Amino acid sequence: MTITNIDITMPSLRQIAKPQSQPYLPPVTGIQPDFSSQTARLPSVSECATHLQLLNAIVRLKFAVDKWGKMKEIPEGRAWNHFCDTAVAKFLRWSENVDASKQTIPVPPLDVLMVWHSFMLNPKDYIRYANRVLQGRLGGKGIDWQQLKLELDSNDEDMPDYMASLIDMTQLSDQQEVSRVCDFDMVAAIQRQLKFSEKMYNAKYLKSRFSDDILTDAIDRYEKFFTLIAENPGVRIAPTQDIDLVWHTHQLWPKSYVAYSRQRTNGRFVNHNDNLDDDTLEESGINGETLFFERFGTAYRICL
Protein backbone atom coordinates (compact mmCIF):
# COMPACT_ATOMS: atom_id res chain seq x y z
CA MET A 1 0.00 0.00 0.00
CA THR A 2 1.02 3.62 -0.49
CA ILE A 3 1.20 5.97 2.47
CA THR A 4 0.59 9.63 1.68
CA ASN A 5 0.39 12.69 3.91
CA ILE A 6 -0.23 10.78 7.12
CA ASP A 7 0.56 12.43 10.45
CA ILE A 8 0.89 10.46 13.64
CA THR A 9 0.43 12.22 16.97
CA MET A 10 2.29 10.28 19.60
CA PRO A 11 1.86 10.29 23.39
CA SER A 12 4.38 12.03 25.61
CA LEU A 13 7.12 10.23 27.50
CA ARG A 14 5.13 10.77 30.69
CA GLN A 15 2.21 8.86 29.20
CA ILE A 16 4.42 6.09 27.80
CA ALA A 17 6.73 5.64 30.77
CA LYS A 18 4.09 5.64 33.50
CA PRO A 19 3.16 2.02 34.36
CA GLN A 20 -0.27 0.93 35.41
CA SER A 21 0.87 -0.20 38.85
CA GLN A 22 3.29 1.60 41.11
CA PRO A 23 6.83 0.18 40.73
CA TYR A 24 9.86 0.59 42.93
CA LEU A 25 11.13 4.12 42.28
CA PRO A 26 14.63 4.88 43.59
CA PRO A 27 15.08 8.32 45.15
CA VAL A 28 16.73 10.98 43.03
CA THR A 29 19.28 11.46 45.81
CA GLY A 30 20.50 7.91 45.15
CA ILE A 31 21.80 8.99 41.76
CA GLN A 32 25.33 10.26 41.88
CA PRO A 33 25.46 13.49 39.87
CA ASP A 34 29.25 13.48 39.91
CA PHE A 35 29.48 10.66 37.36
CA SER A 36 32.53 12.51 36.14
CA SER A 37 34.32 11.57 32.95
CA GLN A 38 37.45 11.35 35.07
CA THR A 39 36.17 8.67 37.45
CA ALA A 40 36.02 4.92 36.98
CA ARG A 41 33.28 4.13 39.47
CA LEU A 42 30.51 1.59 39.16
CA PRO A 43 26.91 2.52 38.39
CA SER A 44 24.63 2.93 41.41
CA VAL A 45 21.46 1.02 42.19
CA SER A 46 19.40 4.09 41.37
CA GLU A 47 21.09 4.54 38.00
CA CYS A 48 20.41 0.93 37.10
CA ALA A 49 16.77 1.36 38.18
CA THR A 50 16.43 4.54 36.10
CA HIS A 51 17.89 2.63 33.17
CA LEU A 52 15.16 0.03 33.64
CA GLN A 53 12.58 2.82 33.56
CA LEU A 54 14.07 4.01 30.27
CA LEU A 55 13.91 0.50 28.80
CA ASN A 56 10.27 0.26 29.83
CA ALA A 57 9.59 3.60 28.13
CA ILE A 58 11.23 2.36 24.92
CA VAL A 59 9.12 -0.82 24.93
CA ARG A 60 5.96 1.23 25.47
CA LEU A 61 7.03 3.51 22.66
CA LYS A 62 7.27 0.48 20.37
CA PHE A 63 3.79 -0.60 21.50
CA ALA A 64 2.41 2.86 20.71
CA VAL A 65 3.93 3.00 17.22
CA ASP A 66 2.78 -0.54 16.40
CA LYS A 67 -0.72 0.20 17.65
CA TRP A 68 -0.92 3.29 15.48
CA GLY A 69 0.39 1.37 12.47
CA LYS A 70 -2.24 -1.31 12.93
CA MET A 71 -4.97 1.29 13.28
CA LYS A 72 -3.88 2.89 10.00
CA GLU A 73 -3.61 -0.52 8.31
CA ILE A 74 0.09 -0.07 7.62
CA PRO A 75 1.92 -3.38 6.98
CA GLU A 76 3.22 -4.89 10.21
CA GLY A 77 6.58 -3.46 11.25
CA ARG A 78 6.67 -0.72 8.63
CA ALA A 79 5.64 2.12 10.95
CA TRP A 80 8.29 1.10 13.52
CA ASN A 81 11.00 0.70 10.91
CA HIS A 82 10.29 4.14 9.52
CA PHE A 83 10.16 5.57 13.03
CA CYS A 84 13.65 4.17 13.69
CA ASP A 85 15.00 5.47 10.36
CA THR A 86 13.73 8.95 11.18
CA ALA A 87 15.06 8.74 14.74
CA VAL A 88 18.57 7.96 13.42
CA ALA A 89 18.51 11.01 11.15
CA LYS A 90 17.36 13.13 14.10
CA PHE A 91 20.11 11.68 16.30
CA LEU A 92 22.79 12.63 13.78
CA ARG A 93 21.54 16.22 13.72
CA TRP A 94 21.24 16.30 17.51
CA SER A 95 24.72 14.89 18.15
CA GLU A 96 26.30 17.48 15.87
CA ASN A 97 24.48 20.41 17.46
CA VAL A 98 23.89 19.56 21.13
CA ASP A 99 25.42 21.87 23.73
CA ALA A 100 28.09 19.73 25.42
CA SER A 101 29.85 22.61 27.16
CA LYS A 102 28.35 21.91 30.60
CA GLN A 103 29.05 19.08 33.04
CA THR A 104 26.19 17.01 31.64
CA ILE A 105 24.47 16.79 28.26
CA PRO A 106 20.75 17.70 28.13
CA VAL A 107 18.67 14.55 27.75
CA PRO A 108 17.26 14.47 24.20
CA PRO A 109 13.74 13.47 23.07
CA LEU A 110 12.92 9.79 23.56
CA ASP A 111 13.32 8.80 19.91
CA VAL A 112 16.78 10.39 19.79
CA LEU A 113 17.64 8.99 23.22
CA MET A 114 16.71 5.50 22.01
CA VAL A 115 19.26 5.78 19.18
CA TRP A 116 21.97 7.27 21.41
CA HIS A 117 21.34 4.52 23.98
CA SER A 118 21.72 1.66 21.48
CA PHE A 119 24.74 3.28 19.82
CA MET A 120 26.62 3.68 23.12
CA LEU A 121 26.06 -0.02 23.79
CA ASN A 122 28.45 -0.67 20.92
CA PRO A 123 31.24 1.32 22.57
CA LYS A 124 34.03 0.70 20.06
CA ASP A 125 31.89 1.99 17.18
CA TYR A 126 30.37 4.80 19.23
CA ILE A 127 33.71 6.10 20.48
CA ARG A 128 35.05 6.07 16.93
CA TYR A 129 32.05 8.14 15.80
CA ALA A 130 32.35 10.51 18.77
CA ASN A 131 36.04 11.09 18.11
CA ARG A 132 36.17 11.15 14.32
CA VAL A 133 32.84 12.70 13.35
CA LEU A 134 32.07 14.78 16.43
CA GLN A 135 35.78 15.47 17.08
CA GLY A 136 35.43 14.67 20.77
CA ARG A 137 32.86 17.40 21.42
CA LEU A 138 30.82 15.22 23.79
CA GLY A 139 33.84 14.61 25.99
CA GLY A 140 32.90 11.02 26.78
CA LYS A 141 29.73 12.17 28.54
CA GLY A 142 26.62 10.03 28.50
CA ILE A 143 23.10 10.01 29.88
CA ASP A 144 22.35 12.41 32.72
CA TRP A 145 20.56 9.91 34.95
CA GLN A 146 19.42 12.54 37.41
CA GLN A 147 17.68 14.64 34.77
CA LEU A 148 16.26 11.56 33.06
CA LYS A 149 14.77 10.23 36.28
CA LEU A 150 13.22 13.56 37.17
CA GLU A 151 11.52 13.70 33.80
CA LEU A 152 10.43 10.07 33.81
CA ASP A 153 8.84 10.58 37.22
CA SER A 154 7.45 14.04 36.52
CA ASN A 155 3.73 14.71 36.66
CA ASP A 156 4.23 18.27 35.46
CA GLU A 157 2.07 19.03 32.45
CA ASP A 158 4.82 21.31 31.13
CA MET A 159 7.47 18.57 31.19
CA PRO A 160 9.44 18.58 27.91
CA ASP A 161 8.27 15.83 25.57
CA TYR A 162 11.00 13.29 24.92
CA MET A 163 9.70 12.27 21.55
CA ALA A 164 8.47 14.20 18.58
CA SER A 165 4.81 15.07 18.97
CA LEU A 166 4.24 14.69 15.26
CA ILE A 167 5.68 12.18 12.80
CA ASP A 168 5.20 12.72 9.08
CA MET A 169 5.29 9.27 7.51
CA THR A 170 6.11 10.81 4.12
CA GLN A 171 9.41 12.26 5.34
CA LEU A 172 11.98 9.56 4.72
CA SER A 173 15.37 9.91 6.36
CA ASP A 174 18.29 10.50 4.04
CA GLN A 175 20.05 7.14 4.25
CA GLN A 176 22.81 8.34 1.95
CA GLU A 177 23.59 11.11 4.41
CA VAL A 178 23.54 8.64 7.31
CA SER A 179 25.99 6.38 5.49
CA ARG A 180 28.23 9.32 4.68
CA VAL A 181 28.81 10.31 8.28
CA CYS A 182 28.67 6.86 9.90
CA ASP A 183 29.06 3.33 8.58
CA PHE A 184 27.50 1.81 11.73
CA ASP A 185 23.97 0.43 11.28
CA MET A 186 22.14 2.25 14.06
CA VAL A 187 18.72 0.91 13.11
CA ALA A 188 19.96 -2.66 13.46
CA ALA A 189 21.43 -1.74 16.85
CA ILE A 190 18.05 -0.38 17.96
CA GLN A 191 16.37 -3.63 16.96
CA ARG A 192 18.96 -5.71 18.83
CA GLN A 193 18.61 -3.63 21.97
CA LEU A 194 14.84 -3.75 21.74
CA LYS A 195 15.05 -7.50 22.39
CA PHE A 196 16.99 -6.84 25.59
CA SER A 197 14.56 -4.06 26.56
CA GLU A 198 11.65 -6.45 26.15
CA LYS A 199 13.39 -9.04 28.36
CA MET A 200 13.83 -6.42 31.09
CA TYR A 201 10.26 -5.21 30.64
CA ASN A 202 8.90 -8.75 31.02
CA ALA A 203 11.16 -9.48 34.01
CA LYS A 204 9.37 -6.67 35.91
CA TYR A 205 12.33 -6.00 38.21
CA LEU A 206 10.95 -2.62 39.20
CA LYS A 207 7.70 -4.14 40.41
CA SER A 208 9.45 -6.49 42.81
CA ARG A 209 9.65 -5.48 46.47
CA PHE A 210 13.19 -6.89 46.34
CA SER A 211 14.32 -4.57 43.52
CA ASP A 212 16.94 -2.85 45.64
CA ASP A 213 18.49 -6.18 46.68
CA ILE A 214 18.35 -7.57 43.13
CA LEU A 215 20.19 -4.57 41.71
CA THR A 216 22.71 -4.44 44.57
CA ASP A 217 23.56 -8.11 43.95
CA ALA A 218 23.73 -7.48 40.20
CA ILE A 219 26.34 -4.75 40.68
CA ASP A 220 28.40 -7.06 42.90
CA ARG A 221 28.15 -9.83 40.30
CA TYR A 222 29.16 -7.37 37.58
CA GLU A 223 32.37 -6.63 39.48
CA LYS A 224 33.05 -10.36 39.65
CA PHE A 225 32.27 -10.63 35.92
CA PHE A 226 34.99 -8.08 35.22
CA THR A 227 37.36 -10.03 37.46
CA LEU A 228 36.83 -13.05 35.21
CA ILE A 229 37.48 -10.93 32.12
CA ALA A 230 40.69 -9.58 33.65
CA GLU A 231 41.92 -13.01 34.72
CA ASN A 232 41.01 -14.80 31.48
CA PRO A 233 42.16 -12.67 28.57
CA GLY A 234 41.15 -14.07 25.22
CA VAL A 235 38.24 -16.07 26.68
CA ARG A 236 34.80 -14.86 25.61
CA ILE A 237 32.38 -14.68 28.55
CA ALA A 238 28.70 -13.89 28.11
CA PRO A 239 26.99 -12.03 30.96
CA THR A 240 23.80 -13.14 32.65
CA GLN A 241 20.73 -10.93 32.27
CA ASP A 242 21.23 -9.05 35.56
CA ILE A 243 24.95 -8.54 34.94
CA ASP A 244 24.21 -7.35 31.42
CA LEU A 245 21.87 -4.68 32.77
CA VAL A 246 24.65 -3.23 34.94
CA TRP A 247 27.16 -3.55 32.10
CA HIS A 248 24.82 -1.63 29.81
CA THR A 249 24.20 1.04 32.44
CA HIS A 250 27.95 1.47 32.86
CA GLN A 251 28.53 1.95 29.14
CA LEU A 252 26.02 4.78 29.00
CA TRP A 253 28.70 7.11 30.39
CA PRO A 254 31.44 6.16 27.91
CA LYS A 255 34.53 7.80 29.38
CA SER A 256 33.92 6.40 32.84
CA TYR A 257 33.30 2.94 31.41
CA VAL A 258 36.52 3.04 29.39
CA ALA A 259 38.44 4.19 32.48
CA TYR A 260 36.97 1.38 34.60
CA SER A 261 37.64 -1.19 31.89
CA ARG A 262 41.30 -0.23 31.62
CA GLN A 263 41.72 0.04 35.37
CA ARG A 264 40.36 -3.46 35.97
CA THR A 265 42.09 -5.22 33.06
CA ASN A 266 45.59 -3.76 33.16
CA GLY A 267 45.02 -1.24 30.41
CA ARG A 268 42.75 -3.23 28.08
CA PHE A 269 39.54 -1.84 26.63
CA VAL A 270 36.68 -4.33 26.94
CA ASN A 271 34.29 -3.90 24.05
CA HIS A 272 30.63 -4.91 24.22
CA ASN A 273 29.49 -6.78 21.14
CA ASP A 274 25.72 -7.24 21.01
CA ASN A 275 25.76 -8.93 17.60
CA LEU A 276 27.02 -12.45 18.31
CA ASP A 277 25.58 -15.59 16.78
CA ASP A 278 23.75 -18.15 18.92
CA ASP A 279 26.58 -20.70 18.93
CA THR A 280 29.08 -18.12 20.17
CA LEU A 281 26.66 -16.94 22.84
CA GLU A 282 26.09 -20.50 24.04
CA GLU A 283 29.81 -21.21 24.27
CA SER A 284 30.43 -17.88 26.03
CA GLY A 285 27.64 -18.64 28.50
CA ILE A 286 29.17 -22.01 29.35
CA ASN A 287 32.54 -20.29 29.86
CA GLY A 288 30.90 -17.88 32.28
CA GLU A 289 29.20 -20.61 34.28
CA THR A 290 32.40 -22.65 34.59
CA LEU A 291 34.76 -19.80 35.42
CA PHE A 292 32.40 -18.07 37.83
CA PHE A 293 31.82 -21.19 39.89
CA GLU A 294 35.51 -22.08 39.92
CA ARG A 295 36.51 -18.56 40.99
CA PHE A 296 33.74 -17.61 43.41
CA GLY A 297 32.12 -20.91 44.40
CA THR A 298 28.59 -19.79 43.55
CA ALA A 299 26.23 -20.31 40.64
CA TYR A 300 26.53 -17.94 37.71
CA ARG A 301 22.92 -18.15 36.60
CA ILE A 302 20.48 -17.37 39.37
CA CYS A 303 16.70 -17.17 39.73
CA LEU A 304 15.56 -13.59 40.25
Image (spheres, rainbow, N blue to C red):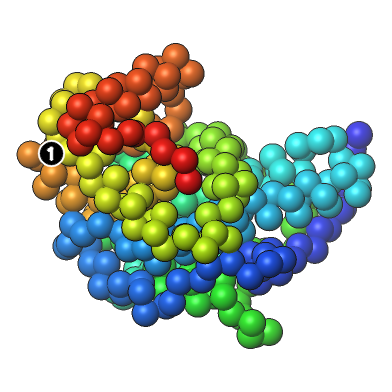
- Residue displayed at 31% across by 74% down: 33
Residue 126, image quadrant = top left
Extreme residue toward the top, this view? 279
| Residue on which the image places disc 1 | 265
Q: Disc 1 on helix, strand or loop?
A: loop
Query: How many numbered markers are drawn?
Result: 1
**Could you say where residue 210 lies in the image, as x and y percent from the top left?**
47, 60
Q: Is residue 78 left or right of residue 214?
A: right
- Residue displayed at 32% across by 26% down: 289
- Residue displayed at 54% across by 59% down: 208
Residue 192, image quadrant = top right
Up-down: is 15 above or below 65? below
**Could you say where residue 260 lies in the image, as x and y percent from the top left?**
18, 50
Extreme residue toward the left, this view? 266
- Residue displayed at 81% across by 58% down: 8
Q: What residue type is labelled 1?
A: Thr
Asked if one can make out residue 91 in the rendered structure from this viewpoint, the answer is no
**Could you say where residue 104 lies in the image, as x and y percent from the top left?**
34, 71
**Which quadrant of the rendered structure holds the N terminus?**
top right
Q: Is residue 258 left or right of residue 19?
A: left
Asked if one can make out residue 287 in the rendered structure from this viewpoint, the answer is yes
Viewer-nearest residue: 127 or 37: 37
